[in-house]
Amino acid sequence: MKHTLSVIVEDESGVLSRIAGLFARRGFNIESLAVGPAERVGISRITMVIPGDNRTIEQLTKQLYKLVNILKVQDITNIPCVERELVLIKVQAFLTTRSSILEIAHIFRAKVVDMAHEYLILEVTGDPGKMVAIKQLLAQYGIVEIARTGKISLTRASNVNTEFLRNTLNKENLVY
């Protein structure tokens, strides 16, 4: 199972290196990593997606707390959250296919951030599933390059689990 960890750290040089070293020494892979300033000056938030069972994640959390400059570690995997990623996709866009690509971009609320005679660069934000879906649709046109951020996430103050609501509404709207 993949777990999402939100780690609050002091914004000091070497913090990320120590965290990466901890994971490397224990043979764990970080599938996604996003780091940026948090709500207070001098504090950063690191969002990591890590494969592992609950016991493994619990052990990693304890090890993270032993590192200097770690203020808070939270496994937010099963907590209602807002999750987003950003992806830039450069796709071949000949005159014959450009309108189809722009239609896909419109449906996914992607922005065209660069246009050339034979290429478009699209900016897409959303949940990880949206990124996979648009990538699959654009693959038939020829994806030239992709740059994708790691997942960023904040827990919902409302505690409303939109994934749960989405699944519940989908079950209620099934046609028999």
Image: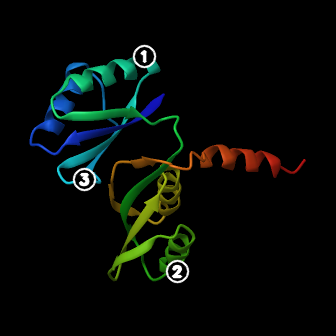
Q: Which residue is mark 1?
A: 55
Q: Amino acid at mark 2?
A: Ser
At 21% from the left and 47% from the top, the residue drawn is 43
| Label 3: which secondary element | loop
Spatial CA distance of label 1 from label 2 is 50 Å
Extreme-right residue of the structure = 176
Q: Residues within 10 Å of mark 1 (few under 14, many from 20)?
A: few
Spatial CA distance of label 3 from label 1 is 31 Å
Q: Residues within 10 Å of mark 3 (few under 14, many from 20)?
A: few
Describe residue 87's horizontal placement relative to residue 158 as left or right.
left
Q: Amino acid at mark 1?
A: Arg
Q: Amino acid at mark 3?
A: Arg
User: How many numbered marks appear?
Assistant: 3
Instruction: Determine whether label 3 and label 2 are within 8 Å by CB.
Output: no
Q: Which residue is mark 2?
A: 99
> How far from the left and from the top, in percent, is residue 68?
15, 29
Q: Which residue is mark 3?
A: 40
| Label 2: which secondary element | helix
| Label 1: which secondary element | helix
Describe residue 154's horizontal placement relative to residue 136 as left or right.
left
Q: Earlier along the polypeptide chain: callout 3 or callout 2? A: 3
Q: Earlier along the polypeptide chain: callout 1 or callout 2? A: 1
Of the two numbered discs 3 and 2 in the rendering, the one whose residue sits closer to the viewer = 3
Describe residue 51's horizontal placement relative to residue 22 as left or right.
right
Q: Which mark is residue 70?
A: none
Of the two numbered discs 1 and 2 in the rendering, the one whose residue sits closer to the viewer = 1
Of the two numbered discs 3 and 1 in the rendering, the one whose residue sits closer to the viewer = 3
Task: Residue 114: name its quadrant.
Answer: bottom left
